[in-house]
Amino acid sequence: MLATVSSASLLGVDGHPVSVEVHVASGLPGFTVVGSPDSVCREARDRVRAAILSCGLTWPMQRVTVNLAPSALRKGGAALDLAMAMGVLVASEQLEASAIDDMAFIGELGLDGTLRRVVGALPLVDAVREPTVVVPPASMFEAGLVGRHRVRSARTLLELVRALAGQEPWPDIAVVRPSPEAVDVLDLADVHGHPMARRALEVAAAGGHHLLMIGPPGSGKTMLAQRLPGLLPDLDDPAAIDATRIHSAAGASLPSGGLVRRPPFRAPHNGASAVAMIGGGASFLQPGEISLAHGGVLFLDEMGEFAVDVIDSLRTPLEEGVVRIARAHGRVTFPASFLLVAAMNPCPCGEGLRPGSCRCSDASLVRYSRRLSGPLLDRFDLRIEVMAPDPGQILRGEPGESTAAVAERVLAVRERTSARGFDTNAQLSARALEEVAPLSVEASAFLERALRAGQLSARGLRRVRGVALTLHDLDGVDPPISVKSVSLAMHLRVEPRFLSRRLAG
Amino acid sequence: MSLPGDARDGDDRCAQLPPEAWVAALASLDGMGPARLGALLGGSDGPAAAWRAVVANRWSWQPGPLVDALGGNGAAIADGWSRAARMLDPAEWWRRHVDAGVGVAVRGSPAYPEVFVDDPDPPAIVFSVGDPDALVGPRVGIVGTRDCTRYGYDVARELGAELSAAGVSVVSGLAVGIDGAAHTGALDVEGAPPIAVVGSGLDVVYPRRHRSLWERVAERGVVLSEHPLGSPPLAWHFPARNRLIAALSDIVVVVESQPRGGSMHTVDEAQRRDIDLMAVPGPVTSPVSAGTNQLLVDGASVARDATDVLVQLGMGPGIRRAAVERRRSPSAAAQAVLDAFDWQPALIDQLALRSGAAIEDLSLALDRLERDGWIDRRGGWFERRTKPERDRPPST
């Protein structure tokens, strides 16, 4: 006999509907799964059989064939276990086919018949067209976020079969909400001194400008970077849904409110591989760190220590806001629009920032500077040098402005930007800048001098103008852009010096 | 069969070669430093005989200067030399130096610089480009760190210019930092010919961004090396180079130096030769003045300007040129920012705290001060300048 059960499979951050067809007929007893399963999916044979037997149900002593349609889609993971089990039970006539009408089943099975949490419940349920969906208890919260379905659950396969057969009522299972995350305690008021770095953080948050901090160990680069997400406004609905799907598909925990509303902060270690960073992987193409940082901040501490190819793979996503991953068995596009914040030592000895302090040889400086590609350094609108503040400043200095006060200004800038029809000032093209942010006569002369003196490149000009516009927006002053803002914008974008900082004759 | 390096074949070309050719060929062998070359020549009956001995690779290995200089691995080194020497045609090698116009002098030849004759560690061979007569006048070595501050750069350049104008040749090593600043200063004025000693072959310009400086020194003065054409700038060449800088100098002035490093090696070599040491004082908090300040504590003379050096040389005070301030006077606001400097590198953060100015105002004031030559910028750092550029150096 034949049974067809609805379910879904994950590719990238999107669920795709899958029909699980189970055929039970006479023949040599056996169990085959066809229709492009990956190895985890193929292992379902053993889990499904053991789960059915553990629940005291009968395994048909016949030939069982499972087809996963559409067969062109590669199926990964264990989320189809439950649908296969239901198919076997219907096809072997242990359950009425009518009992599972208009229902979809998503879940992993344990050998004892328990229903286990699946990765990516949110996009999987989103792909389901049936009005009712059955998921494991631990995935009920994520399944409920989609909002279109009646979400059912049971603790074990046996409980589920009894409820479907009408022998027992559906079990009453409380939705487990994630525990509320710790309140964000990283306040900008804790930062003493660092006036330039504070201003750079504010500008980065307000205009979406990528930020590079160069400084010796212990100068406070990480502390500063961790305070950036607090300055960013909440994600709007489309971004929040994207971010939530990504987090669900990557198996990351969701906030108790359901949607990822606060901008995420991702700080991968410098040993991260290219796949971990941009996404991919053997079976169902998982999102990487840059997608998990979608809408928030990607912080690369010790950027010089990352593998060169990993760093270079960031360039296209930085330009396009998405990352396209193509593999033999599928192509996916992940959202990856993030604010890049990087920190690095000025040279291998770490002390090379201050003129006359570095003990590195020329050769080691050349080697170090090769680790960073010029095109990537060029993508940072803001490049500042950070030194540990004076001890007196730390102990006796006035605390700076709080995160709340700065975030208010940032929000106002973002609103001005969207009123102009753009997402962030950093995205403005040269032509848009000409229109939105005309230069004052004085500022224009100032920039011309800088261009002539070689202090500024044509590409750098666009970035400096964008930052100058953000500075204006923060002060609430309309363009034309003043010479003061242009000057500060250039001071916020220092040339990374490395080898060239030594004075030649 | 006769190999090119085998001089016993009675080749006429080889028989007519001057002693310089044989020493130049010997100096081209891997790992042939001044000590080994000296010992080799000292233990042989003339340079041609030394070359034949190297090619034949027949040694008595009796204890002596050569065995000491070769160390424990002597047999392997001699094997390598022998192999390399068989591949080298000394006549061809010599031709190459003659064609390139490189001056070559060995001990005992008339062109050998007199200053090296009584040196405790004399070079066995000296290659030169430029005018060898540049070595005749009074000479002052100006050395210091490669990673100098703007203060050190300005002082070195000013010393180079003033000493050169007073008729004193500046001796230095053409490295980046202080070395380059001293020679740039010497070339800023019409004066005594500059002298450079380098650690590579005279056709291997190192560091490469000093090519133009190197060429101008060779044009106005002389560039010396112990290494034949084509020799790379190996790390071990530089301590030997530093000893020649010390040997050539009547006085060595250290402008900025960490407590250890190449400049301190020059200082040690100068002390071995009883050459007067002078040091430029610097801020006690500056890492690159730690070495020079320590030299002052240890009894070096203070070099505040060229006059101090000239007095030490016994040349009497030079004519002090009245300083004419040609820079545009800063505005009151800019002057307040300038006052926040303490002659040490500073970040905008520090200047903001000291002056109390908002960073918008500060950034514009700094740009104006930089434009008018009052300060200098490197990355995010600012340094106050004593004088404006004579002509803008290719610094950043």
Image (cartoon, coloured by chain):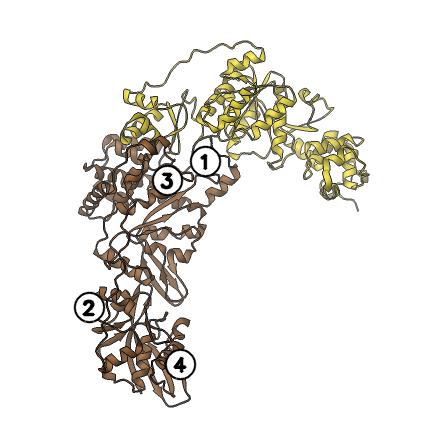
Give chain B's shade: yellow
Q: Categorize mark 2 by other alpha carbons within 10 Å: few (<14), some (14-19), many (20+).
A: some
Residue where numbered disc 2 is placed: A148
Q: Amino acid at mark 2?
A: Arg
Q: Quadrant of residue A170?
A: bottom left
Query: Left or right: where does residue B338 sit relative to residue A232?
Result: right
**B64 or B31: nearer the eye?**
B64
Q: Chain of mark 1?
A: A
Residue A185's x, y, as percent?
28, 46
Q: Is residue A225 visible?
A: yes
Residue where numbered disc 1 is placed: A352
Q: Amino acid at mark 1?
A: Gly
Badges 3 and 1, same chain: yes
Badges 4 and 2, same chain: yes
Q: Chain of mark 3?
A: A
Residue A447's x, y, as percent?
30, 33
Regarding mark 4 in the picture, which secondary structure is present there? strand
Give chain A's shade: brown
